[in-house]
Image (cartoon, helix red, strand yellow):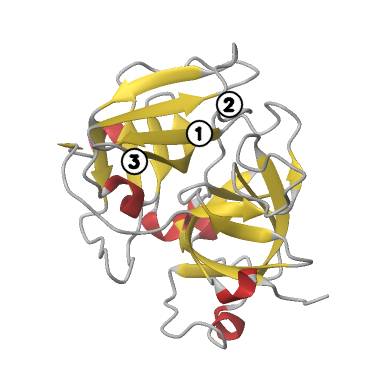
Amino acid sequence: MKEIVLIFIVFSLVTAHVTRNLSREITFRRLNQPASFEDTRIVGGNEAVPNSLPYVAVLRMIFNGSSSSCGASLITTRYVLTVAHCLDDGMLSLEVILGKHKLLETEPTQQTIPTTTYKIHEQFNNETLVNDIGVVYLPTPAKINRYVQLIALPSRADVSNSFAGSEAIASGWGDDYDPTTDGKEVLRYVNVRIITNAVCNETFKDIIDSNICTAGTDKKGVCFGDSGGPLVVNKTLVNLYQFISLEKMR
């Protein structure tokens, strides 16, 4: 068994000083430009109990002749948080889906909210993925219930916290590379360990302070399909999926 089979880099939310007063701080733009980043998906892990992770959201993007999805987290009844590279796209339409378990089915628990309005970090770099963070506005507020709930955000006291050594939960609708399961259809989760940037730098170069790395074990971790999904420590959102090592998936 390899101790580290997958490492992915995530953007630290605490460095962004995220607050729930977003409506006073943000000016939005409409759907427009193209980008070119692969998304990440959960590899292995376990199927989540339906609606046990009620803060997880799906962003569904429609393009000219194709569609794709990213993960997100519900942080207020009007906003979901995701990575900027999912939004920096030539989308024809965008919708946020809450309360999902089976990705490819319409479920009575889900809330589907079309939107055209979002905001990415003003200093986001699409090549280096520095400041890879964005929010999507919900013109119809989310209805909070047992299936749809807000995720707790980190406090200002966590700004300097690297969370190294902490156990975290990553979740998404990713391909688990197991032909006996429907990895792309149900919400899955995996426990991962946050490692230091020094250890991460042994595999990836140019790690910056606002990056946090995690390691999966026993061929479990994150793979293609759900960039922007939540990384959670003690029921608090601390990071977003951003980038993975393909070599570690083999």
Question: Mark 1 to mark 3: distance in Å?
Answer: 12 Å
Q: Residue at x 65, y 18 (%)?
A: 146
Comparing marks 3 and 2, which lies closer to the viewer? 2
Q: Does residue 106 appear to the left or right of 195 in the view shown?
A: left
Q: Is residue 60 above or below residue 46?
A: above
Earlier along the polypeptide chain: callout 3 or callout 2? 2
Is label 3 in a helix, a strand or a loop?
strand
Earlier along the polypeptide chain: callout 1 or callout 3? 1
Q: Residue at x 38, y 31 (%)?
A: 79
How far across and how far down the image is residue 16, in percent? 38, 56
For label 3, count other residues whose C-alpha is less than 10 Å away and answer few (under 14), some (14-19) or many (20+): many
The residue under label 3 is 135
In the figure, residue 167 lies in which quadrant? bottom right
- Number of the label disc, if any, that sits on residue 100: 2
In the figure, residue 5 lies in which quadrant? bottom right
Name the foreground residue: 22 vs 96: 96
Residue furthest to the right in view is 1
Name the foreground residue: 199 vs 236: 199
Residue furthest to the bottom in view is 202
Specify the amino acid type for callout 2: Lys
Is residue 239 in view?
no
Comparing marks 1 and 3, which lies closer to the viewer? 1
The residue under label 1 is 57
Question: Mark 3 to mark 2: distance in Å?
Answer: 19 Å
Name the foreground residue: 216 vs 185: 185
Q: Quadrant of the C terminus?
A: bottom right
How far across and how far down the image is residue 93, in percent? 26, 30
Label 3 with label 2: CB-CB less than 8 Å = no
Is label 1 in a helix, a strand or a loop?
strand
